[in-house]
Each structure stands twice: as structure tokens, then as C-alpha cells.
Image (tube, rainbow, N blue to C red):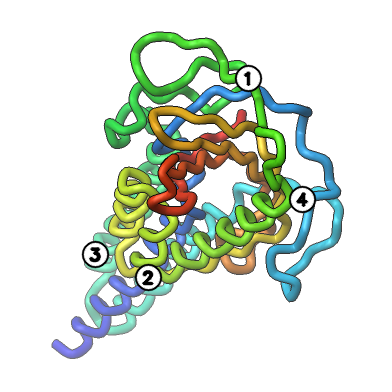
């Protein structure tokens, strides 16, 4: 009986490795969620002068990193390797090759399930997210139509009010970007609530709940920021900031490129500060 319990515990542990790695992701999970807008950038891809290491101790060379999808498969492969070892362990404990084969099939099936689940989460239609996002589009191109509402509207012309402290705003936006990644890793719900709108908070919390007990460490290697637009809509200010650079979502993996726009809102009456209302992927 003790041998059986040890074998079952080992199987559950190896499965936990697969789940934890498969669900590791930055804030927003690399998908568009929450508020979606159409904005026109002042320039093409942001220049390199805004690139700063978010964590000096982990700064990487200035060469542009190449996206790597291999890190997404390391967890499932490690789980399968552990499963092979478990099969040998079961045989050694006298449980028979038949039982070991059944366990191996279960582990392989579970690994395939989580890989497919991860792929579907990456490609899931944005219409399945909270209704706050409205009819969400495909990953954003700056000329695309707005995602909210059913009627098409003209693209928002990029505009920044005179006297707006762009440099100070972008510096704080970068700090909040890194801070939210850390809060997401540590599942600091209250910190996330303080920097997001209720709708966006619900999106992120749902992702954390789906992650279960898995741990993750997200390293922002390089971070560029560009203020695309500041507008007043529905009694609130809306600022669209384009973030791009390199990020490491799995410990030990190569940094992968990312490019997304965060939409920040602030009530006109100043009742609260800026909060993240949406994340929009740039194609």
C-alpha cells in the first residue's frame, strides 16, 4: 500500500509541473482584453532610445531578442520525461507493466490536454471575454476599427494635449507595467486591484484563478514605451501607451519579444488615478 501511495504522489507531482509551466504568462496572457481602441501612432515601431532594463540585475545585451516558443513546451516535455521515469518506478515496485502502461497513457493524455488548452487560450476569440470588451477585434493593427460597440467609428487621431508631461507619464507607466507583472506573479490581488479598472481586474483575477497553485516568475528584460493618444471619452481621460520589448515568462527560457498597447483611464473629476482598462495586442 505504501508503495502505491508513493507512486501516486510522484505522478501527481509530475503533472503539477506540466500545469504550472503551461499556464505561466505575463499580465493579460498575451491576449487582447478589456477596453479596445483604434489609435494612429505618431511613428512606426518605437525607437531604441526608450529601451531600458526593467531590472538592472537581469539586463540583457542590446541586440534584439528573437521570440522563442520552445519555453512553452519545456513543461509538458519535462512532465512526459517524468512519466517515463514513473513507469520504470512502477515496474520496479512490482506493479506490473500493464499498470505502468496505463499510467503512462494517462500522463500523455493529460499533457496533450494542457497543451491543447494552452493553444486554444492563445487563439480564443476575444468575444468570449467579459462584455466590457464589446466586439473585440483580431490583434490590433493601428488602422483597425474600434472593438467596442457594434457600430463602426472612425479611427482616433493621435493627439496629446499641450503641456502634458509625456516623459513623466511614460516613466510612471513603465514602473506600473513592471509592478503589475510582479503582482501577477505573486498573486497580489490587492495590488492588481489598485492599478486596474473593475472590468480589467476581473479578467486578470480569472487568469490567476485558472493558474491554480502554480508559481511563475516574469522578467521584463527590456521595455519601450510610446504615448499614442490622450483623449476625453465618456467623462474620463483615456491614454493609450504602446509597450514593447523583451520579456521572459518562464524561468531559464530565452526572452521573447512582445508588442501591445495598454489603455489607461482616469475620471475627469480626479476621483482616482490612472488605471489599466484594457490590453490590446499589436499585430
Mark 4 to mark 1: distance in Å?
32 Å
Relative to 185, 241 lies left or right = right
Mark 2 to mark 3: distance in Å?
20 Å
**N-terminal label among 3 and 4:** 4
**N-terminal label among 2 and 3:** 2
**105 vs 31, nearest the viewer:** 31
| Element type at mark 4 | loop
Question: Label 4: which residue?
Answer: 65
Disc 1 versus disc 3: nearer the observer:
1
Q: Contact (CB < 8 A) between labels 3 and 4?
A: no
Mark 3 to mark 4: distance in Å?
47 Å
Q: Contact (CB < 8 A) between labels 1 and 3?
A: no
**254 vs 109, nearest the viewer:** 254
Question: Label 1: which residue?
Answer: 157
Disc 2 versus disc 3: nearer the observer:
2
Residue 95 visible here: yes
Q: Quadrant of the N terminus?
A: bottom left
| Element type at mark 3 | helix
Relative to 59, 281 lies left or right = left
Question: Label 3: which residue?
Answer: 98
Relative to 49, 268 lies left or right = left
Amino acid at each position: 500500500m505504501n508503495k502505491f501511495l508513493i507512486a501516486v504522489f510522484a505522478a501527481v507531482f509530475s503533472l503539477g509541473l506540466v500545469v504550472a509551466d503551461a499556464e505561466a504568462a505575463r499580465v493579460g496572457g498575451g491576449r487582447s482584453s478589456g477596453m479596445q481602441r483604434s489609435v494612429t501612432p505618431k511613428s512606426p515601431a518605437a525607437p531604441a532610445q526608450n529601451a531600458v532594463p526593467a531590472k538592472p540585475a537581469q539586463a540583457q545585451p542590446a541586440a534584439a531578442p528573437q521570440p522563442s516558443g520552445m519555453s512553452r513546451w519545456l513543461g509538458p516535455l519535462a512532465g512526459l520525461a517524468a512519466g517515463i521515469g514513473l513507469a520504470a518506478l512502477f515496474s520496479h515496485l512490482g506493479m506490473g507493466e500493464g499498470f505502468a502502461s496505463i499510467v503512462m497513457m494517462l500522463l500523455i493524455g493529460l499533457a496533450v490536454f494542457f497543451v491543447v488548452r494552452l493553444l486554444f487560450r492563445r487563439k480564443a476569440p476575444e468575444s468570449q471575454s467579459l462584455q466590457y470588451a464589446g466586439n473585440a477585434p483580431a490583434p490590433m493593427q493601428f488602422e483597425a476599427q474600434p472593438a467596442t460597440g457594434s457600430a463602426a467609428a472612425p479611427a482616433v487621431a493621435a493627439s496629446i494635449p499641450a503641456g502634458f508631461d509625456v516623459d513623466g507619464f511614460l516613466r510612471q507607466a513603465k514602473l506600473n507595467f513592471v509592478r503589475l507583472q510582479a503582482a501577477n506573479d505573486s498573486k497580489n490581488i490587492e495590488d492588481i486591484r489598485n492599478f486596474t479598472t473593475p472590468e480589467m481586474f476581473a479578467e486578470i483575477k480569472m487568469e490567476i484563478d485558472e493558474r491554480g497553485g502554480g508559481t511563475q516568475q516574469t522578467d521584463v528584460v527590456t521595455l519601450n514605451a510610446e504615448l499614442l493618444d490622450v483623449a476625453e471619452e465618456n467623462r474620463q481621460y483615456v491614454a493609450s501607451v504602446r509597450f514593447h520589448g523583451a520579456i521572459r515568462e518562464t524561468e531559464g527560457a530565452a526572452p521573447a519579444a512582445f508588442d501591445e498597447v495598454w489603455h489607461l483611464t482616469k475620471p475627469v473629476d480626479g476621483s482616482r488615478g490612472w488605471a489599466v482598462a484594457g490590453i490590446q495586442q499589436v499585430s
